[in-house]
Image (cartoon, rainbow, N blue to C red):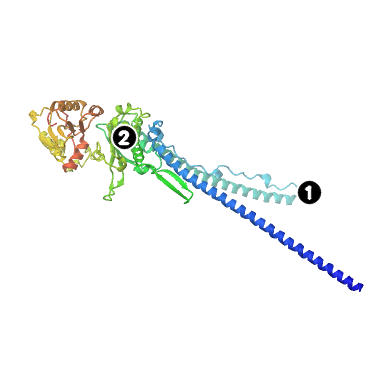
Amino acid sequence: MARRTGLVAAASRISREADRQRAAQIRANAAAQREAMRARAAYERASAADAKERKRLYEESRAAEATALTDAGDEALDILSTLLAATLSVDDHIDFDSLKQPAILPTWGRSDLETSSVPPVWAQFAPPEPAGAAKVFGKAKHEQAIAAARTAFELAQREDAAREAARVAEWTRVRGLFDEAVRAAHAKAAAQHTEVDAFRAEFEAGEPDAVVSYFDLVLQRSTYPEGFPQGFRIAFVPGSRQLVIEYELPGAAIVPAVKLYKYVKASDSITETARPLAQIRAAYASVVAQVTLRTIHEVFEADRGRNVDTVVFNGVVDTIDPGSGKNIRPCVVTVRTTRDVFAELDLARVDPLACLKHLSAAVSASPAELTPVRPVLEFNMVDARFVAETDALSGLDQRPNLMELTPTEFEALIQNLFTKMGLEAKQTRPSRDGGVDCVAYDPRPIFGGKVVIQAKRYKNTVGVSAVRDLFGTLQNEGASKGILVTTSGYGQASFDFAKNKPIELIDGANLLYLLAEHAQIEAKILPPEDWHDPAVDVPGL
């Protein structure tokens, strides 16, 4: 009985212990689950915080991107507003010596040929002296060793002499080639320096090609912001010391079209606020005016030798006509100014557009829309200027020579020209013209009126007195405009006097162009060798 009771008690203890273990395991499992839940919750909170931080950083980067785009546009606009100011601190003059390129000398790379080899020394070959009993019994053997060493030494000497001779011969050959390359480099540099000196001499002498090349270099060195085309053509009229520039201007797209960039979180996008059209037009008009003044300034500042008295600037835009799809080059600004007039300007303080108005420039009423103006001088007029007296083919040229026409024929030609241009022109009688070769009437209301025309068949530059006489005739005749036509050209004083007066000066280049354009007459101007300009202006000359 006692034994059974003990067994029951033991079984009960075992059961209770198992229950305790199961309960402990349940509690441990529950604790583990709670810990896992806490860990999961912490992970989810951390993930959410991390995602929130990533989102914040992303939104900040997008907002910074929008701000950078806005700042870039503002910076570009600021640069456009200082195009003229940027060149005022630059010396545009080109020192001809700076164009001389130094000789590009070859590098001597054969130092291995410079050092002679070390000749063999007998001590390196001589056998050691016998010692002890060998002095007595090994004498013959020692002498044989000396003979063998002597043979080896002499062979080494011959081989060294051959190597040295080969080295000297190779050095002589290579050095000769090197010296020849050095002489060629110096000769090439000397030839280039001679070309520069010839260029300088031709420029100082006012040779047209040299003058054009020099100012081509000047304008090429003018640094503009990225996006500017900087294409141009230059011509020089030596008779009137007039430089004509046709400059390719950028289109209105050079002005940033977007004023403000803003990041919108809701749509995760960057929106654009357009720059007001009025602001774009004003900024572009300023760009056109600044480039015009800047170019003229660079020319006059670079011309220390005073080869140029007058600059004509035509600013054109290379674009496509949206109506026809054809390439067009409308002129949006044109001005003619003299050195003395331009020197009176304080470019650091002027308003560019107001300054052009002061210079009597013609500026497009809407440059951004490429509304064209009529150039004061077409560039092609300068290209088709005169037939050089040294032209061997001039005798075979079938174009009529204006210098060979009679006075009456020349007047008739001028009358025909202006009639073709839309004026009601009449030729005056030689004995009663009162200094007037042709009287014309512009039929347009308001802008029209009486026009007096004088023509000068001259070889040399027309003096300012002829322009003054025309102005006096204009006033006496009660005309609204006076036109002076010549087969030669005009000087700075003539342009200065004509400024702001109802006078138009047409030189030989202009005349040839107008005849071809309006009267379909391809002519030339070739004064005979014995031609002498009249001392006193007479009708028809």
- Residue 157, compared with residue 529, is above or below; it is below
Disc 1 crowd, CA 10 A, few/some/many (<14, 14-19, 20+) = few
Front one among 395 and 233: 233
**In the rendered structure, which disc, 2 or 1, sits on the residue that comes first in sequence?**
1
Three-letter residue code for mark 1: Val
Q: Position of residue 336 (x, y in %)?
A: 27, 33
Q: Which mark is residue 211?
A: 2
Q: Position of residue 169 (x, y in %)?
A: 52, 45
**Left or right: residue 72 compared with residue 530:** right
Front one among 509 and 147: 509
Extreme residue toward the right, this view: 2
Q: Which residue is identified by label 1? A: 136
Q: Position of residue 116 (x, y in %)?
A: 58, 43
Is residue 180 in view? no
Q: Quadrant of the C terminus?
A: top left
Q: How many marks?
A: 2
Comparing labels 2 and 1, the label whose residue is closer to the camera: 2
Three-letter residue code for mark 2: Val
Q: Residue drawn at (43%, 43%), measured in percent from left and top?
A: 260
